[in-house]
Image: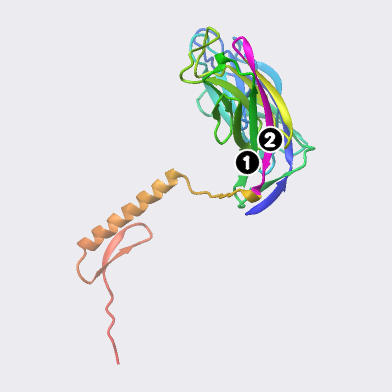
Amino acid sequence: MQKEFMPYWNLNVTVLRAKFNQSHDLLTNSDCYVVLKIPTACTCSHRTKTITNNNAPEWNETFQFRVHSGVKNILEFYIYDADTFTKDDCCSTILFDISNLTLGQKMTKCFISDDDEKNNELWVEFKVTPSPENPVQYLSNGVLMAAPLCALEVKADNLRTNVNNLLLKLGGAFKEDCVLSESMSYYINRDLETEFSLMPSKDVTEVDGVYVNQLNPLSTVPIKPVPTKKKIKLSLPVGKGSVHLQVKTEHRSSEDMNVRLDFDIPNEEKNFKRQQYSSRDRQTRSLNTGRKSGQAAITRNNGETDLSHKPEYKQTG
Protein backbone atom coordinates (compact mmCIF):
# COMPACT_ATOMS: atom_id res chain seq x y z
CA MET A 1 0.00 0.00 0.00
CA GLN A 2 1.44 3.37 -1.06
CA LYS A 3 1.07 6.65 0.81
CA GLU A 4 0.57 9.62 -1.51
CA PHE A 5 0.38 13.35 -0.87
CA MET A 6 -1.36 15.25 -3.67
CA PRO A 7 -2.70 18.83 -3.70
CA TYR A 8 -6.24 20.13 -3.73
CA TRP A 9 -7.74 22.18 -6.55
CA ASN A 10 -10.39 24.88 -6.54
CA LEU A 11 -12.75 24.52 -9.49
CA ASN A 12 -15.00 27.35 -10.69
CA VAL A 13 -17.80 26.33 -13.06
CA THR A 14 -19.88 29.02 -14.77
CA VAL A 15 -23.03 27.82 -16.52
CA LEU A 16 -23.35 30.37 -19.32
CA ARG A 17 -26.25 29.52 -21.61
CA ALA A 18 -28.05 26.79 -23.51
CA LYS A 19 -29.83 26.32 -26.81
CA PHE A 20 -32.72 23.92 -27.31
CA ASN A 21 -33.69 23.17 -30.90
CA GLN A 22 -37.05 21.87 -29.75
CA SER A 23 -39.18 22.74 -26.76
CA HIS A 24 -39.62 20.19 -24.01
CA ASP A 25 -43.14 21.50 -23.33
CA LEU A 26 -46.14 20.91 -25.53
CA LEU A 27 -47.60 24.40 -25.80
CA THR A 28 -44.80 26.72 -24.60
CA ASN A 29 -41.04 27.01 -24.71
CA SER A 30 -38.89 25.18 -22.16
CA ASP A 31 -38.58 26.15 -18.48
CA CYS A 32 -35.08 24.86 -17.82
CA TYR A 33 -32.52 24.76 -15.03
CA VAL A 34 -29.19 22.93 -14.64
CA VAL A 35 -28.06 20.71 -11.74
CA LEU A 36 -24.32 20.16 -11.14
CA LYS A 37 -22.65 17.39 -9.10
CA ILE A 38 -19.15 16.05 -8.40
CA PRO A 39 -19.78 12.97 -6.23
CA THR A 40 -16.09 12.59 -5.31
CA ALA A 41 -15.99 16.13 -3.88
CA CYS A 42 -19.43 16.83 -2.46
CA THR A 43 -22.60 14.91 -1.64
CA CYS A 44 -24.69 18.03 -2.29
CA SER A 45 -25.74 19.31 -5.68
CA HIS A 46 -25.84 22.84 -7.07
CA ARG A 47 -28.52 24.20 -9.38
CA THR A 48 -29.13 27.27 -11.44
CA LYS A 49 -32.29 29.32 -11.34
CA THR A 50 -35.14 28.34 -13.65
CA ILE A 51 -35.49 30.36 -16.87
CA THR A 52 -39.14 30.17 -17.92
CA ASN A 53 -40.56 29.98 -21.45
CA ASN A 54 -37.19 30.25 -23.18
CA ASN A 55 -35.42 27.86 -25.57
CA ALA A 56 -32.20 29.90 -25.38
CA PRO A 57 -31.78 30.54 -21.63
CA GLU A 58 -28.82 32.48 -20.22
CA TRP A 59 -27.78 31.87 -16.62
CA ASN A 60 -24.19 33.15 -16.12
CA GLU A 61 -24.11 31.53 -12.67
CA THR A 62 -20.83 30.39 -11.07
CA PHE A 63 -20.37 27.49 -8.66
CA GLN A 64 -17.28 26.44 -6.67
CA PHE A 65 -15.98 22.96 -5.93
CA ARG A 66 -13.01 21.82 -3.85
CA VAL A 67 -11.53 18.68 -5.40
CA HIS A 68 -8.61 16.36 -4.68
CA SER A 69 -6.22 16.20 -7.64
CA GLY A 70 -5.36 12.53 -7.12
CA VAL A 71 -8.95 11.34 -7.56
CA LYS A 72 -10.83 10.92 -10.85
CA ASN A 73 -13.39 13.72 -10.60
CA ILE A 74 -16.35 13.58 -12.98
CA LEU A 75 -18.55 16.68 -13.21
CA GLU A 76 -22.17 15.77 -13.87
CA PHE A 77 -24.62 18.14 -15.58
CA TYR A 78 -28.36 17.44 -15.58
CA ILE A 79 -30.64 19.72 -17.60
CA TYR A 80 -34.23 19.72 -16.32
CA ASP A 81 -37.45 21.16 -17.64
CA ALA A 82 -39.57 22.40 -14.75
CA ASP A 83 -43.21 21.29 -14.65
CA THR A 84 -45.94 22.63 -12.42
CA PHE A 85 -48.16 19.60 -11.87
CA THR A 86 -45.84 16.69 -12.70
CA LYS A 87 -42.28 15.64 -11.91
CA ASP A 88 -39.59 17.74 -13.63
CA ASP A 89 -38.29 16.14 -16.82
CA CYS A 90 -34.56 15.37 -17.15
CA CYS A 91 -33.84 16.51 -20.72
CA SER A 92 -30.10 15.82 -21.00
CA THR A 93 -27.21 14.35 -19.00
CA ILE A 94 -23.59 15.42 -19.57
CA LEU A 95 -20.48 13.94 -17.92
CA PHE A 96 -17.12 15.75 -17.99
CA ASP A 97 -13.75 14.59 -16.63
CA ILE A 98 -12.08 17.68 -15.12
CA SER A 99 -8.63 16.20 -15.75
CA ASN A 100 -9.12 17.59 -19.29
CA LEU A 101 -8.69 21.09 -17.85
CA THR A 102 -5.36 22.92 -17.64
CA LEU A 103 -4.39 24.27 -14.23
CA GLY A 104 -4.58 28.07 -14.10
CA GLN A 105 -6.28 28.51 -17.49
CA LYS A 106 -9.87 29.36 -18.35
CA MET A 107 -11.67 27.09 -20.78
CA THR A 108 -15.07 27.50 -22.42
CA LYS A 109 -16.75 24.39 -23.78
CA CYS A 110 -19.92 23.72 -25.72
CA PHE A 111 -21.50 20.38 -24.86
CA ILE A 112 -23.88 18.90 -27.42
CA SER A 113 -26.21 16.29 -25.98
CA ASP A 114 -26.16 12.91 -27.68
CA ASP A 115 -28.94 11.28 -25.64
CA ASP A 116 -31.55 12.35 -28.18
CA GLU A 117 -31.68 13.67 -31.74
CA LYS A 118 -32.33 17.26 -30.72
CA ASN A 119 -28.61 18.19 -30.38
CA ASN A 120 -29.19 20.58 -27.49
CA GLU A 121 -26.25 22.81 -26.55
CA LEU A 122 -24.90 23.77 -23.13
CA TRP A 123 -22.11 26.37 -22.86
CA VAL A 124 -19.93 26.24 -19.73
CA GLU A 125 -16.79 28.08 -18.59
CA PHE A 126 -14.20 26.38 -16.36
CA LYS A 127 -11.23 27.52 -14.33
CA VAL A 128 -9.20 25.30 -12.01
CA THR A 129 -6.57 26.78 -9.67
CA PRO A 130 -4.29 25.36 -6.95
CA SER A 131 -5.70 25.42 -3.43
CA PRO A 132 -3.63 26.93 -0.59
CA GLU A 133 -4.55 23.95 1.62
CA ASN A 134 -1.79 21.55 2.58
CA PRO A 135 -1.99 18.11 0.93
CA VAL A 136 -3.18 15.24 3.12
CA GLN A 137 -2.17 11.61 2.97
CA TYR A 138 -4.16 9.20 0.79
CA LEU A 139 -3.61 5.45 0.60
CA SER A 140 -3.28 3.93 -2.87
CA ASN A 141 -2.60 0.61 -4.57
CA GLY A 142 -1.59 2.41 -7.77
CA VAL A 143 -5.14 2.38 -9.17
CA LEU A 144 -7.58 3.14 -6.34
CA MET A 145 -7.38 5.81 -3.63
CA ALA A 146 -8.58 5.63 -0.02
CA ALA A 147 -9.37 9.00 1.53
CA PRO A 148 -8.55 9.92 5.14
CA LEU A 149 -11.28 8.96 7.59
CA CYS A 150 -12.69 10.93 10.47
CA ALA A 151 -15.33 10.39 13.14
CA LEU A 152 -17.99 13.01 13.84
CA GLU A 153 -19.37 13.10 17.36
CA VAL A 154 -22.71 14.93 17.35
CA LYS A 155 -24.64 16.12 20.39
CA ALA A 156 -28.16 17.55 20.21
CA ASP A 157 -29.25 20.14 22.80
CA ASN A 158 -32.69 20.61 24.38
CA LEU A 159 -34.62 18.13 22.21
CA ARG A 160 -38.36 18.83 22.24
CA THR A 161 -40.98 16.09 22.38
CA ASN A 162 -42.29 16.97 18.91
CA VAL A 163 -39.02 15.87 17.28
CA ASN A 164 -39.26 12.26 18.42
CA ASN A 165 -38.71 9.60 15.75
CA LEU A 166 -36.85 11.94 13.42
CA LEU A 167 -33.66 10.88 11.63
CA LEU A 168 -30.49 12.92 11.35
CA LYS A 169 -28.83 12.06 8.02
CA LEU A 170 -25.22 12.83 7.08
CA GLY A 171 -24.76 12.36 3.33
CA GLY A 172 -21.81 10.16 2.34
CA ALA A 173 -21.22 8.72 5.82
CA PHE A 174 -20.60 4.99 6.35
CA LYS A 175 -24.00 4.85 8.04
CA GLU A 176 -25.94 7.90 6.91
CA ASP A 177 -29.02 7.77 9.16
CA CYS A 178 -29.14 7.93 12.95
CA VAL A 179 -32.22 8.32 15.11
CA LEU A 180 -32.14 11.86 16.48
CA SER A 181 -30.97 11.66 20.08
CA GLU A 182 -28.71 13.47 22.52
CA SER A 183 -25.55 11.74 21.19
CA MET A 184 -24.78 10.32 17.71
CA SER A 185 -21.65 9.17 15.84
CA TYR A 186 -20.76 9.12 12.12
CA TYR A 187 -17.73 7.97 10.10
CA ILE A 188 -16.98 9.75 6.83
CA ASN A 189 -14.34 10.75 4.27
CA ARG A 190 -12.68 13.76 5.88
CA ASP A 191 -12.36 15.56 2.54
CA LEU A 192 -16.03 15.33 1.58
CA GLU A 193 -18.29 18.36 1.60
CA THR A 194 -21.69 17.20 2.77
CA GLU A 195 -24.85 18.22 4.63
CA PHE A 196 -26.93 17.28 7.63
CA SER A 197 -30.60 16.64 6.93
CA LEU A 198 -33.51 16.13 9.30
CA MET A 199 -35.72 13.39 7.87
CA PRO A 200 -39.07 12.08 9.12
CA SER A 201 -39.11 8.38 9.95
CA LYS A 202 -41.80 6.02 8.66
CA ASP A 203 -43.91 6.66 11.77
CA VAL A 204 -43.94 10.47 11.40
CA THR A 205 -46.70 12.06 9.32
CA GLU A 206 -46.77 15.57 10.81
CA VAL A 207 -44.65 17.97 12.85
CA ASP A 208 -46.32 20.74 14.85
CA GLY A 209 -49.59 20.02 13.04
CA VAL A 210 -48.05 20.30 9.56
CA TYR A 211 -48.11 17.30 7.21
CA VAL A 212 -44.64 16.11 6.14
CA ASN A 213 -43.51 14.09 3.13
CA GLN A 214 -41.31 11.18 4.23
CA LEU A 215 -39.22 11.49 1.04
CA ASN A 216 -38.27 15.13 1.59
CA PRO A 217 -36.00 16.52 4.33
CA LEU A 218 -37.57 18.81 6.91
CA SER A 219 -34.44 21.00 6.82
CA THR A 220 -30.81 20.80 5.74
CA VAL A 221 -27.58 22.54 6.61
CA PRO A 222 -24.31 22.23 4.62
CA ILE A 223 -21.10 21.22 6.34
CA LYS A 224 -17.60 21.66 4.93
CA PRO A 225 -14.60 19.54 5.99
CA VAL A 226 -14.03 20.33 9.67
CA PRO A 227 -10.48 20.52 11.08
CA THR A 228 -9.62 17.84 13.62
CA LYS A 229 -10.46 18.61 17.27
CA LYS A 230 -12.50 21.67 16.28
CA LYS A 231 -16.12 22.06 17.42
CA ILE A 232 -18.82 23.71 15.35
CA LYS A 233 -22.44 24.57 16.13
CA LEU A 234 -25.29 24.04 13.68
CA SER A 235 -29.01 24.72 13.80
CA LEU A 236 -31.74 23.01 11.79
CA PRO A 237 -35.23 24.52 11.88
CA VAL A 238 -38.08 22.05 12.34
CA GLY A 239 -41.72 22.87 12.89
CA LYS A 240 -42.03 25.86 15.21
CA GLY A 241 -38.56 25.42 16.68
CA SER A 242 -35.04 24.26 15.87
CA VAL A 243 -32.65 21.41 16.59
CA HIS A 244 -29.27 22.65 17.82
CA LEU A 245 -26.21 20.49 17.17
CA GLN A 246 -22.63 20.50 18.43
CA VAL A 247 -20.27 18.70 16.06
CA LYS A 248 -16.72 17.60 16.89
CA THR A 249 -14.33 15.73 14.58
CA GLU A 250 -11.84 13.11 15.63
CA HIS A 251 -9.10 12.01 13.22
CA ARG A 252 -8.77 8.27 12.62
CA SER A 253 -5.20 7.22 11.88
CA SER A 254 -4.65 4.99 8.86
CA GLU A 255 -2.22 2.98 10.99
CA ASP A 256 -5.17 1.71 13.05
CA MET A 257 -7.36 0.94 10.06
CA ASN A 258 -7.49 -2.19 7.92
CA VAL A 259 -7.69 -1.15 4.26
CA ARG A 260 -8.13 -3.39 1.26
CA LEU A 261 -8.17 -1.79 -2.19
CA ASP A 262 -9.21 -4.09 -5.01
CA PHE A 263 -10.68 -3.79 -8.49
CA ASP A 264 -12.18 -6.16 -11.01
CA ILE A 265 -13.66 -6.23 -14.50
CA PRO A 266 -17.35 -5.25 -14.84
CA ASN A 267 -20.02 -7.92 -14.42
CA GLU A 268 -21.06 -7.52 -18.06
CA GLU A 269 -17.56 -8.45 -19.21
CA LYS A 270 -17.48 -11.39 -16.78
CA ASN A 271 -20.74 -12.72 -18.19
CA PHE A 272 -19.49 -12.28 -21.77
CA LYS A 273 -16.29 -14.21 -21.04
CA ARG A 274 -18.26 -16.90 -19.20
CA GLN A 275 -20.53 -17.33 -22.24
CA GLN A 276 -17.50 -17.56 -24.54
CA TYR A 277 -15.85 -20.28 -22.43
CA SER A 278 -19.13 -22.17 -22.11
CA SER A 279 -19.66 -22.08 -25.90
CA ARG A 280 -16.11 -23.31 -26.56
CA ASP A 281 -16.54 -26.11 -24.02
CA ARG A 282 -19.79 -27.29 -25.64
CA GLN A 283 -18.16 -27.17 -29.10
CA THR A 284 -15.19 -29.20 -27.90
CA ARG A 285 -17.43 -31.86 -26.32
CA SER A 286 -19.47 -32.08 -29.53
CA LEU A 287 -16.36 -32.55 -31.68
CA ASN A 288 -14.93 -35.18 -29.34
CA THR A 289 -18.22 -37.09 -29.47
CA GLY A 290 -18.55 -37.01 -33.27
CA ARG A 291 -15.01 -37.81 -34.37
CA LYS A 292 -13.65 -41.24 -35.15
CA SER A 293 -10.72 -42.87 -33.45
CA GLY A 294 -7.46 -41.52 -34.75
CA GLN A 295 -8.94 -38.11 -35.74
CA ALA A 296 -8.13 -34.78 -34.16
CA ALA A 297 -10.17 -31.55 -34.17
CA ILE A 298 -8.23 -28.65 -35.68
CA THR A 299 -9.57 -25.09 -35.40
CA ARG A 300 -8.14 -22.84 -38.10
CA ASN A 301 -7.58 -19.08 -37.91
CA ASN A 302 -10.83 -18.39 -39.74
CA GLY A 303 -12.81 -20.23 -37.04
CA GLU A 304 -13.58 -23.32 -39.15
CA THR A 305 -13.00 -26.75 -37.61
CA ASP A 306 -11.67 -29.74 -39.51
CA LEU A 307 -11.49 -33.37 -38.45
CA SER A 308 -8.07 -34.64 -39.51
CA HIS A 309 -6.18 -37.85 -38.94
CA LYS A 310 -3.56 -37.77 -36.27
CA PRO A 311 -0.07 -38.32 -37.62
CA GLU A 312 1.37 -41.70 -36.74
CA TYR A 313 4.84 -41.88 -35.28
CA LYS A 314 6.73 -45.16 -35.64
CA GLN A 315 9.47 -46.06 -33.30
CA THR A 316 12.75 -46.88 -35.06
CA GLY A 317 15.60 -48.49 -33.61
Q: Image check: 265 left or right of 31?
A: left
- Give the residue type at disc 2: Thr
* Residue displayed at 61% across by 48% down: 257
Q: Main secondary structure of the magenta part?
A: strand
SS under mark 1:
loop
Out of 258 and 9, give the one closest to the viewer. 258
Q: Residues within 10 Å of mark 1 (few under 14, many from 20)?
A: some
* Residue displayed at 72% across by 48% down: 5
Span shown in magenta: 238-254
SS under mark 2:
strand
In which image quadrant can residue 157 be found? top right
Q: Image check: 39 left or right of 7?
A: left
Task: Point out the image quarter for the N terminus.
Answer: bottom right
Residue 250, percent across and down? 68, 38
* Residue displayed at 54% across by 50% down: 262
Residue furthest toward the bottom? 317
> Which mark is on residue 178?
none
* Residue displayed at 51% across by 7% down: 27
Q: CA distance from mark 1 to mark 2?
A: 26 Å
Q: Which residue is mark 2?
A: 249
In which image quadrant can residue 151 be found? top right
- Give the residue type at disc 1: Lys
Task: Point out the image quarter for the C terminus.
Answer: bottom left
Q: In the rendered view, tell whether residue 292 sits above or below residue 25.
A: below
Q: Residues within 10 Å of mark 2 (few under 14, many from 20)?
A: many
Q: In the rendered view, tell whether residue 309 sits above or below residue 42.
A: below
> Which mark is on residue 72?
1
Q: Is residue 81 visible?
A: no
